[in-house]
Image: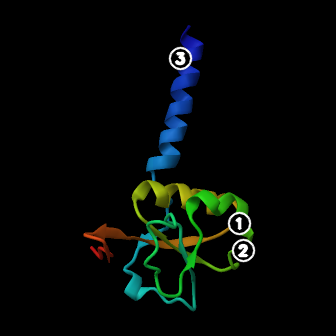
Amino acid sequence: MAIPMTLLALLLAGSSYRRFMPLHGMEKRCLEHVDGGAVTILDIRPYNISNEEVAGAMNLPYAYLMRNYKEIPDQPIHLVASDALEKNLGARFLQRKGFEVVSYSLVEKDNGDMHVPCN
């Protein structure tokens, strides 16, 4: 009985780690301070949330990354996500596929307006 419980605990720990622990080396940046020429700005928010597009960003929701990641240019990536969970899952997936995710921005909606916290 102890072995199945230990395996279950390890699976849960691994899943929690992938979801909630950020990648090392990624820094939080304001969108205003991101140079779109040096990095690919990748917006992984769902289409219904990202209808106010980020200027110069490639919009590819997290749900479509597995099918369409080959469309992403081969250069460092700045992620735009709606929350930390989406950012962590997207960054880990892209890292497994060989991309370098260097920074991120979390974009929130306040009363229907896009808000980018810069602190």
Q: From the viewer's perspective, is residue 34 above or below residue 115? A: below
Q: CA distance from mark 2 to mark 3?
A: 42 Å
Q: For this rendering, which residue is in front, 55 or 87?
A: 55
Neighbor class of circle 3 (other Cα within 10 Å; few <14, some 14-19, many 20+) is few
Q: Is residue 80 left or right of residue 68?
A: left
Q: Are marks 2 and 1 in contact (CB under 8 Å)?
A: yes
Which three-letter amino acid code belongs to the residue tagged 3?
A: Met
Q: What residue lies at 74% left-to-right and 70% top-to-bottom?
A: 70
Q: Tell me the element at label 1.
A: helix
Task: Look at the image and name its color scheme.
Answer: rainbow
Q: What residue lies at 59% left-to-right and 69% top-to-bottom?
A: 60
Whichever of callouts 2 and 3 sits on the residue coming sooner in the sequence is 3
Q: From where the camera sits, is residue 22 visible? A: no
Marking on residue 5: 3
- Mark 1 highlights which residue? 68
- Percent from the top left, x then y, of residue 64? 64, 61
Which three-letter amino acid code belongs to the residue tagged 2?
A: Glu
Q: From the viewer's perspective, is residue 102 above or below residue 84? A: below
- Mark 2 highlights which residue? 71
Q: Tell me the element at label 2.
A: helix
- Percent from the top left, x then y, of residue 69? 69, 67
Whichever of callouts 3 and 1 sits on the residue coming sooner in the sequence is 3
Q: Nearer the viewer, mark 2 or mark 3?
A: 2
Which three-letter amino acid code belongs to the residue tagged 1?
A: Asn
Neighbor class of circle 2 (other Cα within 10 Å; few <14, some 14-19, many 20+) is few
User: Which image quarter: residue 27?
Assistant: bottom left
